[in-house]
Image (cartoon, rainbow, N blue to C red):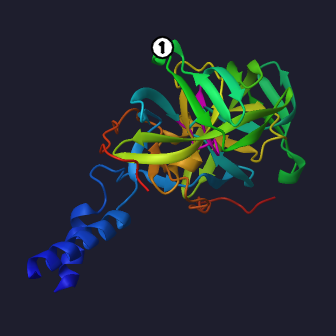
Amino acid sequence: MKGSLLAASLAALLHLAAAAAEKRVIGGVEEVILLPWGVRLPARIDTGAAGSSLDAREVRVAGKEVELRLAPEFGGRTMRLPILRWRTIKTPEGKGRRPVVRLEVCLGPERIVTEVNINDRSDLEHPFLAGRNLLAGRFVVDAERRQILPPQCPLGPRPR
Amino acid sequence: MILPIVFAVLAALGPAPGAGETKTTIGAVEEALLLPWGVALPARVDTGAARSSLDARDVRIDGGEVTFLLPEQYGGLSLRLPLYEMAAFRTAEGEAVRPVVSVELCLGARRIRALVSLNDRRYMAYPLLLGRSFLADGFLVDVSRSHVLKPACKGIRGRP
């Protein structure tokens, strides 16, 4: 009885301490894993972008869902995801619209559910772009370094 | 009884090992001074950009020199600087060739010489963009913060 109480308070303290600990340092490029598919993608860590985005081919809107295909270099998997909303993008040619979906990604030890806009950027170097919405409160970026925090996420059901 | 445990746990989990002891943490937006003129410019801190850039109008290349105006809202100074190089940039519009000059910036207490490309940034929120080549010089970026540093370089006169 006393032991379990001590264990519980220790667990609570550890949780508190983890929250107080410093944010994890990541480099200017990191590998992320798209869950639940387990697709590994190199990601550009971009503090200049408000949102995150996924580079995809054959982006097609079907009702309230978007269908897309990852580039063949990254397995070419087809995905079908509910559209949360649309994001208007200003480009030199005028305004563009991109579907925004919710994706779960693994970055370092963290499973993160985040909003991502779908975009055919044909950026084969970094098909995933992690913007401020994903980074805030979790990571600090050391742009001089690359791939310093490999994805190592606990498996199991989706958090929250 | 509990407090010592809290401190022990916090100490154990505290700053992550090797987490930039010697690097300075800055936010997603910082104020920099353009030296020697002391012009204060809000800067977007952008790990997604390889290089830095400065908002310049009426850019003219004249032999080995570049003349340009700073935007009116930042004093509109007319400047003449040696042309460092012409460099090709990948932009949203495709390839662009822009002049690059070397400028001295004050960020926090540090004076830093930086290469910046000159281009018209009137449709962007910030007149100065600090990219990876600048940030590699000892900075960590925490996007959950902004204006972490106040320009405090020695021997600078007030703003014009």
Image height check: is B3 above or below B150? Answer: below
Secondary structure of residue under mark 1: helix
- Disc 1: which chain? A
Relative to B12, B89 lies left or right: right
Q: Is residue B110 left or right of residue A117?
A: left
Q: Residue furthest bottom?
A: B1
Against A59, is B129 above or below? below
Give the left or right position of residue A116, taking residue B25 as reference: right
Q: Is residue A35 visible?
A: yes
Inspect this view and state whether residue B34 appears: no
Mark 1 burial class by Cα count in 10 Å: few <14, some 14-19, many 20+: few
Residue wearing tag 1: A73
* Quarter of the rendering occupied by the C terminus of chain A: bottom left
Any magenta on residue B156?
Answer: no
The magenta segment: A45-55
* Residue located at (37% from left, 52% from top): B22
- Vertical order, A83 against A16 (above or below): above
Q: Amino acid at mark 1?
A: Glu
Where B52 sits versus A154, above or below? above
Most foreground residue, B100 or B13: B13
Q: Which quadrant holds residue A51?
A: top right
Q: In which quadrant of the rendered view does residue A146 lie?
A: top left
Residue B96, percent across and down? Answer: 75, 19
Q: Nearer the viewer, residue B132 or B79?
A: B132
**Quadrant in which the N terminus of chain A is drawn:** bottom left
| Residue B119 in the image, given as x and y percentages of width and height | 79, 32
Q: Nearer the viewer, residue B50 or B9?
A: B9
Give x and y (percent) for residue A20.
36, 67
Residue B65: x %, y % from top left:
78, 25
